[in-house]
Image (spheres, rainbow, N blue to C red):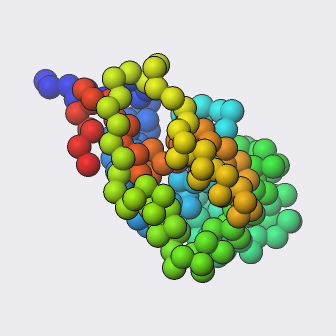
Amino acid sequence: MFHMKRCSWVKESNPLYVAYHDTEWGKPLHDDQALFELLCLETYQAGLSWGTILNKRASFNQAFYDYDVAKVAQMSDDELEVLLQNPAIVRNRRKIYATRTNAKAFIKIQKEFGSFDEYLWRWGGYAPIVNKVEDYANFPASTPLSENLSKDLKKRGFKFVGPVCVYSFLQAAGLVNDHEVDCDFKSI
């Protein structure tokens, strides 16, 4: 039986990792709701493993109205406090409250640019940046692009969007294709 080669970071023992890598990661994404979800997931991941976030993803979707940005932006403090008691998600007060803050900032960008997609993709020149990654052990965790986008997002009111988080988001949303050169899933 033929075995597909994947990027070295994929935990092949975790079916969620495999499915995420094979079907989502690095594929150009243009749907605002999906972009909002990915941005939120990356902010929750700060300091945790991606496996933890993938394992809690369905619960995060349920907790945050499937990332309907308008509903998330209107969540009350009481609703957010209830979420802090939910063991199925990451119960970090700053990250939970940042989800609402980021939803409000996201909506402002949508109003200014017509969509978050338009705002985001202009940073990369409207086409994926394809890097030749030999091995993640020798690859940077952030780039000038992620550093500049991070600064702009922070200026616009976003929280938990440091350069490393933003670079992971750019990879996940397909603005940057960092599949390793020998990965069978590197084609866009």
Residue at point 38% right, 21% down? 135
At which x and y percent is residue 141? Answer: 54, 32
Quarter assignment of residue 77: bottom right
Q: Which of the pair 21/55 is nearer the observer?
A: 21
| Picture layout, residue 71 above or below residue 154 | below
Residue 106, x across and y down, in percent: 63, 68
Place residue 99 in its image quadrant: bottom right
Quadrant holding the N terminus: top left
* Residue at the extreme left: 1
Q: Is residue 146 visible?
A: yes
Numbered disc total? 0
In the displayed structure, 86 sits above or below 75; it is above
- Side (left or right) of 186 relative to 67: left
| Residue 103, percent from left and from top | 67, 66
Q: Is residue 129 left or right of residue 2?
A: right
Residue 65 in view, yes or no: no
Give above or below for 57 relative to 17: below
Give whichever of 88, 22 is nearer the camera: 22
176 on left or right of 77? left
- At x 60% / y 31%, what residue is drawn? 49
Residue at image location 23% in from the left, 43% down from the top: 187
In-front residue for pair 119/90: 119
The quarter of the displayed image where residue 28 is located? bottom left
Residue at coordinates 71% horizontally, 48% vertically from top-left? 160
- What is the x, y in percent for residue 138? 46, 20
